[in-house]
């Protein structure tokens, strides 16, 4: 039994992965990280440059993009180092900080999705009062408050974790430090700590999800009652976009959290890690592409940018350019 915390932990990653595949896996996570960051940065740049997008709905999109960049930056670079340079060591306090930020951004994403559904609920169910109820100032204040509030539950868990005594192995059988792997390294029975973490995770996921489901039921009812077919399709298209984002965020998580409830469903360490990486890294990767492909305003802006770039591209030598002179 140790009287003080270990100086460092070692992130093992996939325990069954053979060393000859380390560089290939490292390159996979590198390209995933670059694509995720660049895609979400594109959304932020489009929002900053186009005043027509500076609306409450797009403020939540930018907030989600920033959160996705933050999460992948906290989680992925160390995983890349693990497989490129076989460097899985991470200092004790760095590991504690990483697990806090991992769960902070997870909580923040859940709250941002809640604010998205609130915005769509007010816009569709109360269209005449919406401009007064949900202004840019209101949404900005709400978004900033969510970025602060999201620290509460992960902060409590982090404080509790720093008070624990660690002993035995310092190897973390996971792709990053989180609240499901660190309690397994504490002295004594870790089941209580794991149970508290499970209850908190369910609360953070289910409370926003309950309101999201409630709001979308009323949204669907309002869409069905619409008289104009064109307006109905445009509204439905917006909801489908956010529905896709909600699905890839919530469904894989419930699969992982529900696995212990089924005794016959055994998850190997490799499968558990792969599943956690799937639901952690897939939404940040897909969100900007879903927005760009499903949101007509963003598609029109990107198309206009491409057209402008083509217009200012220098003509090839010898190409005849016709100039019309008006009288």
Image (spheres, rainbow, N blue to C red):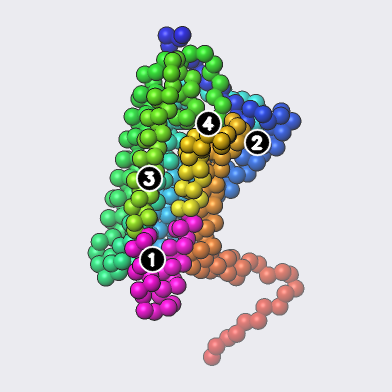
Give me the C-alpha separation between circle 2 and circle 3.
Answer: 34 Å
Q: Residues within 10 Å of mark 4 (few under 14, many from 20)?
A: many
Give me the C-alpha separation between circle 4 and circle 1.
Answer: 39 Å
Which residue corresponds to the image point at 28% horizontal and 60% vertical from the top-left?
134
Quarter of the image that includes the C terminus: bottom right
> Vertically, is 252 above or below 176?
below
Give me the C-alpha separation between circle 2 and circle 1.
Answer: 43 Å
For the residue pair 197 and 55, the one nearer the viewer reads as 197
Mark closer to the observer (4, 1): 1
Q: Secondary structure at mark 3?
A: helix
Residue that numbered label 1 is attached to:
220
Q: Residues within 10 Å of mark 2 (few under 14, many from 20)?
A: many
Residue that numbered label 2 is attached to:
26
Dot 3 and dot 1 residues touching (CB under 8 Å): no
Which portion, as a residue range, is magenta?
Answer: 216-245
- Residue 176 is marked as 4
Does label 4 or label 3 sit earlier along the sequence? 4
Residue that numbered label 3 is attached to:
206
């Amino acid at each position: 039994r140790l009287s003080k915390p270990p100086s460092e932990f070692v992130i093992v990653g996939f325990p069954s992965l053979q060393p000859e595949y380390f560089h290939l896996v490292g390159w996979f996570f590198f390209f995933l990280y670059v694509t995720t960051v660049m895609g979400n940065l594109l959304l932020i740049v489009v929002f900053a440059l186009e005043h027509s997008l500076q609306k409450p709905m797009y403020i939540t999109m930018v907030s989600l993009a920033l959160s996705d960049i933050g999460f992948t930056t906290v989680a992925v670079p160390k995983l890349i180092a693990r497989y490129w340079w076989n460097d899985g060591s991470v200092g004790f306090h760095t590991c504690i900080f990483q697990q806090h930020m991992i769960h902070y951004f997870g909580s923040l994403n859940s709250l941002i999705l809640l604010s998205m559904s609130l915005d769509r609920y007010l816009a569709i169910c109360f269209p005449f009062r919406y401009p007064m109820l949900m202004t840019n100032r209101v949404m900005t204040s709400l978004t900033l408050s969510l970025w602060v509030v999201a620290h509460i539950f992960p902060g409590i868990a982090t404080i509790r974790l720093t008070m624990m005594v660690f002993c035995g192995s310092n190897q973390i059988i996971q792709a990053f430090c989180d609240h499901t792997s660190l309690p397994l390294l504490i002295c004594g029975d870790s089941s209580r700590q794991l149970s508290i973490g499970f209850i908190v995770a369910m609360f953070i996921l289910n409370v926003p999800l309950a309101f999201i489901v409630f709001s979308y039921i009323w949204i669907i009812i309002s869409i069905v009652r619409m008289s104009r077919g064109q307006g109905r399709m445009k509204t439905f298209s917006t909801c489908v976009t956010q529905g896709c984002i909600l699905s890839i965020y919530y469904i894989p998580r419930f699969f992982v959290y529900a696995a212990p409830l089924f005794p016959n469903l055994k998850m190997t360490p490799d499968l558990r890690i792969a599943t956690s990486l799937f639901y952690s890294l897939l939404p940040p990767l897909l969100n900007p592409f879903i927005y760009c492909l499903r949101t007509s305003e963003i598609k029109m802006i990107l198309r206009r940018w491409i057209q402008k770039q083509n217009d200012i591209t220098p003509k090839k030598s010898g190409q005849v350019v016709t100039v019309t002179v008006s009288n």
